[in-house]
Image (cartoon, rainbow, N blue to C red):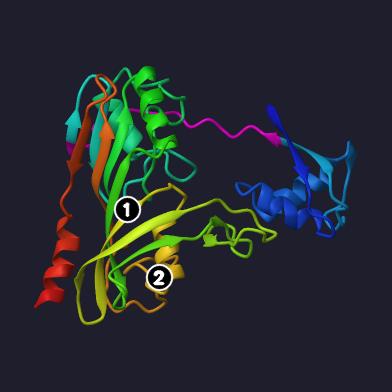
Amino acid sequence: MSSRSQTLHLNAPGQRLDKVLTQELPDLSRTQIQRLLKEEQILVNGRPAKANLRLEGGEEVSVTLPEPEETELIPEAIPLDIRYEDDDMLIINKPAGMVVHPAVGHSSGTLVNAVLAHCPDLPGIGGEKRPGIVHRLDKETSGLIVIAKNEPALRHLQAQFKERTVGKQYLALVDGQVQPPTALIDAPIGRDPRQRKKMAVIPFGSSARSRPAQTQVTTITGYDDYTLLRCELFTGRTHQIRVHLAYIGFPIVGDKVYGRRKPSIRLGRHFLHAAVLRVKRPSDNEELTIQAELPPELDAVLNHLAE
């Protein structure tokens, strides 16, 4: 089996090695890290180390990881709701329940499988595992996502996301009556050190790592116990809107990870929809604004609340 190496420079004096590694290597479980330590695939300053080693600070850690098994990308004739297409890019209205790209447990039925059938020349654009993918949406989030159809377009679109010139607006229904009607949530987000599959607001200066995150929220409609919000992203962190809204006490309706334990509205998904995407066309730099209306299951919730 082939392997790959990764070098980490740690500065966490007094902390246990295994706990620091769970933060530095979020794609690995604690069990995997323990196994790598036992198999001497993790070296501290060139020597094997135990999980309970207390760090002094300034250690160089070498981690040897097995290469993940390759997932073959197979084109599948899955219908796509295409909202814009030219020679450089596709903008698709993704349904809730569809994973963006294949991974363990999701080898078929993904957006990438569908796009490969629509664009046979796509393999290899931006990497074999995520061809053409510029950004992503969570499985249960519906709405607009852009796909690059060639390498120059991919670089152009990636640059827009990196420079934060892409406009992304989402619609979210949350528990509670949000006040004030407009606010900027400016709170850094990182991997939750207690539940590593979740993200959390983690203040700078904490032992866990975090990155800046800003979300602008504006009330569209207030109901008795709920609020429909427009959320605009200024950064693009994993689960950003879901984490930020839960952090201020207004979790998204139907969110199984960050939402209420006993939801009062039964919904087979969370109420988050990427409604507006503003992006510059790679061919001529002209700005496009594409919109996607709420899907029927979310529209039905609002109609019920308005009765």
Residue at x-position 15% and y-position 51%: 293
46 part of magenta stretch? no
In the picture, measured across the screen, residue 18 lies left or right of residue 284, that is right
Q: Find residue 7 and report its image quarter.
A: top right
On residue 24, the disc is none
Question: Mark 1 falls on what kind of element?
Answer: strand
> How far across and down, in percent of the image, does residue 176 sit?
31, 78
Query: Which amino acid does the dot numbered 2 rest on?
Result: Gly
In the picture, measured across the screen, residue 79 lies left or right of residue 196, that is left
The image quadrant where one finds the N terminus is: top right
Please name the residue that numbered disc 2 is placed on. 259
Please name the residue that numbered disc 1 is placed on. 232
Earlier-in-chain disc, 1 versus 2 = 1
Query: Which amino acid does the dot numbered 1 rest on?
Result: Glu
Range drawn in magenta: 65-82
80 part of magenta stretch? yes
When the figure is inspected, residue 38 is found, relative to residue 161, above or below; the finding is below
In the picture, measured across the screen, residue 205 lies left or right of residue 129, that is right
Residue situated furthest right in the rendering: 47
Depth check, front residue: 200 or 111: 200
> How far across and down, in percent of the image, does residue 233 sit?
36, 51
> How far across and down, in percent of the image, does residue 91 sit?
24, 35
- Of circles 1 and 2, the one toward us is 1
Distance between the alpha carbons at the discs numbered 1 and 2: 20 Å
Q: Which is the main secondary structure of the residues drawn in magenta?
A: loop
Residue at x-position 53% and y-position 30%: 70
Residue situated furthest bottom in the rendering: 224
